[in-house]
Image (spheres, rainbow, N blue to C red):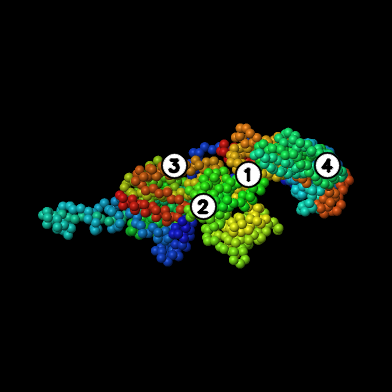
Amino acid sequence: MAFLTPFFLLGLSAIAIPVLIHLIQREKKRVIEFPSLMFVRRIPYQSVRRRRIRHWALLLMRAAAIALIVAAFARPFIHQGTVAAAVGGGAREVVILLDQSASMGYGDHWSRARDAARAVVRGLGADDRATLVLFDKNAEENMRATSDRTRLEAAINAAHVGSGATRYGPALKLAESILSRSAIKRREAVLVSDFQRSGWSGSEEVRFPEGMTVSTVSVASPNSANLAVPSVTFARASFSGQERITVTAGLSNKGDEPLKDVPVTLTIDGHEIQTERATVAPHAAGSVTFAQFTLTGPNVRGSVRAGADLLPADNIFHFVLAPSEPVSLAIVDSGDRSDGSLFLSKALSIGTTPTFHVDVASASRVTPTAFDKRAVAVLNDTMFPPAGGGGVLKRFLERGGGLLVVTGDHTTWPPGEAELLPGRLGATVDRTSGRSGSLGYLDYSHPVFEVFKAPRSGDFSAAHVFRYRALQTLPTDRILARFDDGAIAAAERKVGAGRAIVWTSTLDDSWTDIGVKPIFLPLVHQLVRYLAHYEPATSWFTVGQVLDLTARAKGRADKSDRIVVTPSGERISQSSAGEGSEGLLELNEQGVYEVRSSGAAAGRPEAIAVNLEPAESDLASIDPRELVAAVTGHATLVEAQPAQAQEMTREESERRQSLWWYLLMAGLLLLAAETVISNHLSRKERFL
Amino acid sequence: MSVADGGINPQSIRNPQSAIRNPRSEMTSSQALPGARFVDPKILLRVGNLELLARHVVEGFINGLHRAPYFGASIDFAEHRGYVAGDDIRRVDWRVFARTDRFYVKQYEADTNTNVSVLLDVSRSMKFSNRGVPKLEYGCFVGACLAYLAQRQRDRVGLITFDNDIVSHVPPSAKHFNVVLHTMERARPERPGNLPIPLHKMAEHFRRRGILVLISDFYEEPDAVLEAIKPLKFLGNDLIVFHVLDPAEIDFGYEDASSFEDLETGEQIPVVPESLVREYRSMIQAHILALTTKFSEHRIDYTVLNTAEPLDRALFSYLSSRERLMRVR
């Protein structure tokens, strides 16, 4: 035992302070004159002979506390002779960055990577500390800085390959953060990875300061061949009232060798439906189309598996299919002409995503039930249908229906239903004389026109407008389009949960020729999709995406609690009332997630297919030196210094042992205990 | 209360200059008079508009403000009585004679003056002071102010100082006010006190009913105090008792364990104030309560004076309450 600052031991003389205080207090005779002690005499008191120490324990505690505090200031340490640091230059702070992305499942990459990480751990000196960081797209501090090699190796053994994509930026940033916090001078990050090129964009703002080094262990295999199924497309067709799906699987060959007669198998609900043979050229993509099959119901799980290689994770592609639900429309026209809604009905008969189910009726014959279970109602140049009065149309809108009012000569609107129409209709404006009108302004921020925003995505100016109805809107109404003279061409009003849009000209060839222009079909489809609140079904997600199950459940009015079963079998409970992050599901695993409602007795659970990020199939690697140079600013790798035995200095020994801290704490605790005990004693007995 | 808001701090009244330099003071002429500092004009200015009236009938020689037991010349009609030979015929009520055909004489209340004697305890306990005015000095202020009030209303003032015996005696006289102040100035707390002996002697001494102002710290048992005072009351004197206490005697605000010396006996007792302060406070309060109860039972005015309180406030509150009570009676 030695002391770094033995001078402070002089403070041990302070042990005498409690005794001196006792003696001084005894000698000091302070007399206070008081008029009369007649009352004091009546109060029983205990006279104490101060010469006698009554509470030896208290005195010893005080002396011990002072001794401990003085010893702490003297900075003691245990002298260990020529104890040497394991590696030259003293202790190291090491951060092991172990790549666990999906690509590490290639061949023996993962086992080699773990071996490399274990080798780093075994190379740690007795005073070195290491942190294990597992990373893919995100980085996680798996084992905090420790010198315990056993724990580090156990953490490495427990790690497994994930499904995430490779991103080096977060991992390196975390390493830099950990190393910056360390007081140890020698700081090093060891990156063990396959160094996928897709994981490093070069724009990550990671920069290690001077003094921190990055060493790399690459487990990448040269000329690694890899076949992947990066995507699947579906073609839907109706036949005999049933929907038939044609699956086309895309294949990509990242290897240098062509892949011939690769078996590609389509599996639906666990049954192998079809196996096709495919040949894919090196560094090329191909596709396989399977025979049609009938979609029987919702949540049909399917997968396409192509061949077998060293990275099996990307050889399979999962998807979930559900029958497409057609958007149901009711077109109400004046009934004067047999083909009054020909343009509209023809345009809507073409759609596939979604398909449209159109019923046409005249205003005089339509019944209130015609609006039931319809997503959209179109009043095509007609008077206000009597069946829509009495609040029928209003209720239809308020529960989420869409209303498209196409104005024309026949269009009338009763004042009692004015709240449903976005504005007040005026007289017909004739633009037949002179230059005809055209659409001059479109609100491209609106979902209807958003798809036409890009250049050459639809020429609305080609359509000629000869007549239109004037419209006066309220400030709360949204103007979607204007004619070249500034008159309103389209406006929208929200009514309850529903949407109402008025088109102030016709959607046929009577007042305008837009019906024969290429823009007509997508415009009508966009209008109906928007009014119907149509959202295309997603057949699969990518690992790393976050799903808001609460929002999905709201769409189905599902109020019960949920249990999510991950592809690995883990069960996650979610409350239906969960707001914010509680309703979010992070899709971390490849495969099919099942979402079960706790209230549902039977039936197929909702399925969510999750696939690898396609870029993860590209095993092309970068030169680790490139990455290190980008991070450290040094073009060359900093080689580890050869081990060099060096005796620790007294200061270093003391700093590592930090015995003063324990002594100081013990002293303070003793003082606290002494205070409590003495207070207790003084309350208990009255003494002087 | 501070000087600024009309109050007088006892520490400030120790400065005799405040009394001497006041041009409006009636005591300006008594600058050289020993004990004049006890009659602070600021105090008198505050209490001067009150009149010290004897509660009971007191005897007197000349006209004053006090009701006398005799009929005399005043404007307050008392009663009629039958005319006897020798009565001044000017007092015959001729209107009554006209109605009744009998001679009646009108009698009037007689106003008189009285003896006001200040009985001041000068025992050693009265020299106690804890960062403030010593109790004896405070008592001198009280006695001097009351004597001044009495002298101004043409009462005769006297002083008796006592400890365990009578120390000095100034007989009541209209001309003894200056002597009273002089005697107060010379009073020194030198001997232990004992209330019964000097009070019994005084009781034998007083022959005429008057106002007795007793100023002491009453370090005796309440029963003993009352037994000592009773004889003074027997003669029909109007007794006013002031119990002078230092704040330290009331709240015992000491912190360090020390030896406490009894000023009366010289005895020293080691005391840890922290451990007995609660009991001490309850005992002193019980002592004051007992004195209050016993004095009120015997219709003796009893007032506790805290030397930390402004003196004028104490006097003012006492005289005010006394005047109010007089009206009720």
Which mark is first along the chain, 1 or 2? 1
Check disc 3 and give the amino acid type.
Ala
Q: Marks 3/2: CA distance?
A: 98 Å
**Which of the 4 image quadrants contains residue A422?**
bottom right
Nearer to us of marks 3 and 2 is: 2
**Which of the 4 image quadrants contains residue A599?**
top right
Left or right: B7 as drawn, with respect to A654 = left
Which mark is first along the chain, 2 or 4? 4
Mark 1 touching mark 4, by CB under 8 A?
no
Q: Is residue B74 visible?
A: yes
The local secondary structure at tag 1 comes to loop
According to the picture, the residue beneath numbered tag 3 turns out to be B286
Between residue A88 and residue A476, name the one nearer to us.
Answer: A476
The residue furthest left is: B101
The local secondary structure at tag 2 comes to loop
According to the picture, the residue beneath numbered tag 2 turns out to be A384
Check disc 2 and give the amino acid type.
Phe
